[in-house]
Amino acid sequence: MNYLENCVFVDESAFNINMRPSDGWAEKGKPAIVIASTRAVSHTILGAVSSKFAVSVMELRNPQEEWSKRIKIDFYIRKSKAPFSNKKSVLKGTVTGHYLVFLEKTMDETDCFPEMKGHCIAVNNAFI
């Protein structure tokens, strides 16, 4: 396998507006300036690149419902025969569903170009 010829590398990166260096410099005898942080939404960028092409990029902002937790809650309620309660499902950021949609989109993009036929998708240990 030649990584420069037939591989597409997939990776993710997360950031928000509060990402700043935690250390700083101040003049001798003066306190360092502290800036209050604001609460911000995290952004996740998923990208797929090869040595010759940027195959696809996807930015995710909106959280998605985590259906697996909802199913577990419903199953537990039915099992214990407790009355049904309207609990809100847990909202998360980037979940496996986003990642799978991105991989499908990447594979569709590589199918459009004949020079990318037979390329392998290399995935690192993504946190998703």
Image (cartoon, rainbow, N blue to C red):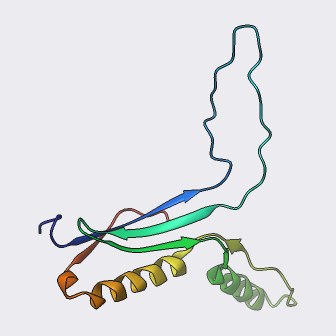
Residue 80 locus on image (x, y percent): 77, 86
Query: As displayed, is residue 54 above or below residue 84?
Result: above
Q: Residue furthest top?
A: 29
What percent of the width, then of the height, locates residue 117?
19, 85
Q: Is residue 115 above or below residue 28?
A: below
* Residue name at image x 77 percent, y 17 percent: 31
- Left or right: residue 19 versus residue 80 is left
> Looking at the rendering, in which quadrant would you find the N terminus?
bottom left
Between 65 and 49, the residue placed more toward the observer is 49
Which residue is at a point 81% across and 91% down the rendered structure image?
Answer: 81
**In the displayed structure, does residue 10 sit left or right of residue 5?**
right
99 to the left or right of 92: left
- Using the image, determine if residue 12 lies above or below residue 80: above
- Please provide percent x and percent y for residue 65: 68, 80
Which quadrant holds residue 25?
top right
How far from the left and from the top, in percent, is residue 11? Answer: 40, 64
As drawn, the residue found furthest toward the left would be 1
